[in-house]
């Protein structure tokens, strides 16, 4: 009896410690995502970064979100005034007694709004999607190099050291052999498939009654956190299996880091949430680029005597489907991925 009580007490103590550690890591991740002051520092260091970030704000903030504001605040009220849908707004009593005109006004008003969406919003959305993805990569690259060019004290490195760093990067890029290139291509294909199926998994889970929204928020947090850090990991040359191992081992930290991103999705309508995320995402990419996540997640382990939270197979379902699809490809890529198979 006493042994069972002690076992339960040890289990309760272990759960309490892990819960505290998880909350601490989640809070650290959330705090890292909110360190937006880094964006101003990096933009001050790199003119190209400031230009790309400004272009993102101009397109997605001023033009895209501004168009939504113009539609909701000016165009729709103007159409409502010109083409009313209520009898008191029509001066003619004969027209008021005839509901056909009101229906025609309503149809015409809705048709004009839909034309605005078709000929302005949807082309603007596609243009924003294409340009933003190009600019995100440039923002991450310029931010990464801006961090590399400065020491921990913020002092600029000498020109000679800069040139050595640049030459080292070029030589590293040129030294890849054919096998390395094929493995890189295979990893990119696998990564695209993995994140695509994970996104579908997030979408489907959102329809589960009662707990669907909470799970959807958690998975979205992980997804956006991975997107943010993937730019840094690509530039630093971290292999895909090491990325996934680090991500799934420190799941609490990344859940906290992605929470501000996911929050924007839940607070606004789809179009507005896209515009808001298109503005915020490059900022979170830069905070992820400047984050020393490996050092941050190691501090709680030291405090809790090296005890970790354990690995959570976040990408297990997406990995299973991706590997099944890759197994059907009779190519070199299909044989290059078994090392990254175990997530």
Image (cartoon, helix red, strand yellow):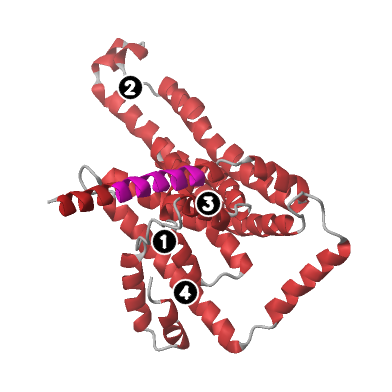
Q: Is residue 152 visible?
A: yes
Residue topped by disc 4? 189
At which x and y percent is residue 137?
A: 61, 59
Q: Secondary structure at mark 1?
A: helix
Q: Residues within 10 Å of mark 4 (few under 14, many from 20)?
A: some
User: Which residue is found at the position 69% from the left and 83% from the top?
Assistant: 175
Position of 217 with respect to 76 (left or right) is left
At which x and y percent is residue 64?
A: 55, 41
In the rendered view of the protein, which quadrant contains the C terminus?
A: bottom left
Q: Is residue 137 above or below residue 187?
A: above
Q: Is residue 204 above or below residue 116?
A: below
Principal secondary structure, stretch drawn in magenta: helix
Most distant residue in the left direction:
1
Q: Is residue 115 visible?
A: no
Q: What separation in Å lies between label 3 and label 1 (alpha carbons)? A: 17 Å
Label annotation for residue 248: 1
**Label 1 or label 2, whichever comes before in sequence order:** 2
Instruction: Give the magenta range.
Output: 13-29
Q: Secondary structure at mark 3?
A: helix
Label annotation for residue 299: 3
**Nearer-the-camera pick, 158 or 137:** 158
User: Which residue is found at the position 47% from the left and 54% from the top?
Assistant: 301
Residue topped by disc 2? 85
**Label 3 or label 1, whichever comes before in sequence order:** 1
Position of 210 with respect to 123 (left or right) is left
Q: Secondary structure at mark 2?
A: loop
Q: What separation in Å lies between label 1 and label 4 (alpha carbons)? A: 20 Å
């Amino acid at each position: 009896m006493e042994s069972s009580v002690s076992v339960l007490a040890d289990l309760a103590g272990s759960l309490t410690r892990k819960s505290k550690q998880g909350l601490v890591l989640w809070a650290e991740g959330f705090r890292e995502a909110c360190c937006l002051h880094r964006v101003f520092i990096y933009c001050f260091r790199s003119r190209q970064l400031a230009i790309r970030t400004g272009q993102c704000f101009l397109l997605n903030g001023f033009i895209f979100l501004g168009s939504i504001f113009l539609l909701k605040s000016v165009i729709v009220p103007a159409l409502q005034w010109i083409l009313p849908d209520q009898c008191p707004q029509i001066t003619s009593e004969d027209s008021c007694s005839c509901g056909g005109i009101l229906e025609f006004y309503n149809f015409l008003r809705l048709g004009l709004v839909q034309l605005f969406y078709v000929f302005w919003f949807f082309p603007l959305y596609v243009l924003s999607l294409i340009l933003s993805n190009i600019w995100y990569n440039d923002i991450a690259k310029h931010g990464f190099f801006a961090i590399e060019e400065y020491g921990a004290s913020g002092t600029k490195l000498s020109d000679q050291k800069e040139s050595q760093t640049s030459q080292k990067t070029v030589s590293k890029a040129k030294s890849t052999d054919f096998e390395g290139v094929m493995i890189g291509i295979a990893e990119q294909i696998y990564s695209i498939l993995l994140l695509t199926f994970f996104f579908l998994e997030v979408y489907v889970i959102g329809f589960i009654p009662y707990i669907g929204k909470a799970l959807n928020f958690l998975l979205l947090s992980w997804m956006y956190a991975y997107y943010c850090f993937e730019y840094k990991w690509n530039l630093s040359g971290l292999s895909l299996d090491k990325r996934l191992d680090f991500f799934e081992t420190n799941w609490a930290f990344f859940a906290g880091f992605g929470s501000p991103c996911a929050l924007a999705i839940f607070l606004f309508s789809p179009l507005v949430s896209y515009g808001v995320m298109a503005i915020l995402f490059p900022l979170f990419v830069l905070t992820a680029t400047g984050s020393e996540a490996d050092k941050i997640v190691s501090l709680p382990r030291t405090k809790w005597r090296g005890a970790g939270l354990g690995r959570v197979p976040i990408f297990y379902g997406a990995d299973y489907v991706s590997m099944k699809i890759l197994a059907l490809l009779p190519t070199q890529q299909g044989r290059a991925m078994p090392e990254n198979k175990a997530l």
